């Protein structure tokens, strides 16, 4: 009797195939308002959670700039890559999401938001390749960008995508990046003063920021803006508040910002026994 050498190999191959996870389904880039891109690839998001634009108080100039730019992108017009930088909790991320929601209402199906996890940035060239083939506009969003010491790859990748690189983002894609500071590269005390040319250190730190067509700053709100933010939310949700109580809330947290205002509104709703 002869031994069929191919049969054991076939059984092993079948077993390995059964153990291997199935290939992920192809992403439908036309079906959803938003996506998340991480190390596993794209994940669809069925709804974008964002405050209504009128509720974003104290950032009127920033709101006008960002919403206009996103609306242009959704309409298929020329639009800028955007860097939203500055104080924590002042609505940078919320404004991006709200602007996309507004643009989707004006141009149904015209634009989608794609949030990129920072640990997936090295694979973003593959994302761009896929998005460039789709008849839709995309705002690729990187939230709270910062680089650890010694991470020179991130800034170099961003520079390449924004301008001049062979893997630059396609024409139907624009980038929106949020950061706590405009110079989104590491800084050290030794960099504050270059003995040969003090300006060189500053220019190098700002080189990446300057690649963005729009650089929009967000700053700590004053007392009036802080109370106006709370008043807008309170009116929207049918809540009442005392200015002194709202200011005491901010003092206990050591800052006034849109995020602190929202936390106070959440406290108000909890006291009133209602959901928001």
Image: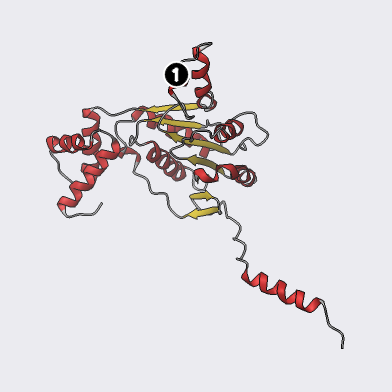
Q: Quadrant of the N terminus?
A: bottom right
Residue positioned most to the bottom:
1
Residue nearer the viewer, 150 or 64? 150
Q: Position of residue 84 (x, y in %)?
A: 43, 32
Residue 165 position by quadrant: top right
Q: Dot 1: few (<14), some (14–19), or many (≥20) neighbours within 10 Å?
A: few
Q: Residue at x 53, y 27 (%)?
A: 208
Q: Please give left or right for residue 132 compared with residue 192 in the image.
A: right
Could one spot residue 238 in this view of the protein? no
Instruction: Identify whether 204 is placed above or below 100.
Output: above
Q: Please give left or right for residue 87 compared with residue 234 in the image.
A: right
Q: Please give left or right for residue 48 compared with residue 13 in the image.
A: left
Residue 219 position by quadrant: top left
Q: Which residue is mark 1?
A: 192
Residue nearer the viewer, 141 or 148? 148
Residue positioned most to the top:
196
Q: Please give left or right for residue 241 compared with residue 148 in the image.
A: left
Q: Residue at x 50, y 11 (%)?
A: 195
Q: Position of residue 95 (x, y in %)?
A: 39, 38
Give the mark count.
1
Q: Position of residue 119 (x, y in %)?
A: 52, 45
Could one spot residue 263 in this view of the protein? yes
Instruction: Identify whether 129 is placed above or below 10.
Output: above
Residue nearer the viewer, 190 or 24? 190
Tag 1, which secondary structure?
helix
Q: How is the image coloured?
A: secondary structure
């Amino acid at each position: 009797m002869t031994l069929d050498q191919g049969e054991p190999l076939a059984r092993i191959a079948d077993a390995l195939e059964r153990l291997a996870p199935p290939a992920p389904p192809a992403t439908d880039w036309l079906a959803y308002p938003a996506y998340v891109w991480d190390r596993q690839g794209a994940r669809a998001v069925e709804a974008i959670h964002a405050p209504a634009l009128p509720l974003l108080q104290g950032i009127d100039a920033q709101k006008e700039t960002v919403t206009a730019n996103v609306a242009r992108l959704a309409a298929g017009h020329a639009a800028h890559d955007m860097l939203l930088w500055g104080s924590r909790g002042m609505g940078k991320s919320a404004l991006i999401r709200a602007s996309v929601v507004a643009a989707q209402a004006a141009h149904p199906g015209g634009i989608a938001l794609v949030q990129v996890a920072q640990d997936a940035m090295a694979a973003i060239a593959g994302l761009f390749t896929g998005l460039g083939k789709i008849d839709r506009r995309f705002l690729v969003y990187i939230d709270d960008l910062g680089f650890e010491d010694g991470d020179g790859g991130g800034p170099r990748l961003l520079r390449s995508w924004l301008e001049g690189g062979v893997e630059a983002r396609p024409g139907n894609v624009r980038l929106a990046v949020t950061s706590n500071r405009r110079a989104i590269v590491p800084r050290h005390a030794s960099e504050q003063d270059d003995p040969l040319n003090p300006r060189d250190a500053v220019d190098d730190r700002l080189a990446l920021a300057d690649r963005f067509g729009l650089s929009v700053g967000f700053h700590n709100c004053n007392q009036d803006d802080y109370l106006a933010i709370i008043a807008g939310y309170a009116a929207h949700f049918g809540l009442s508040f005392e200015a002194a109580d709202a200011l005491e809330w901010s003092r206990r947290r050591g800052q006034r910002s849109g995020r602190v205002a929202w936390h106070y509104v959440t406290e108000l709703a909890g006291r009133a026994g209602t959901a928001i």
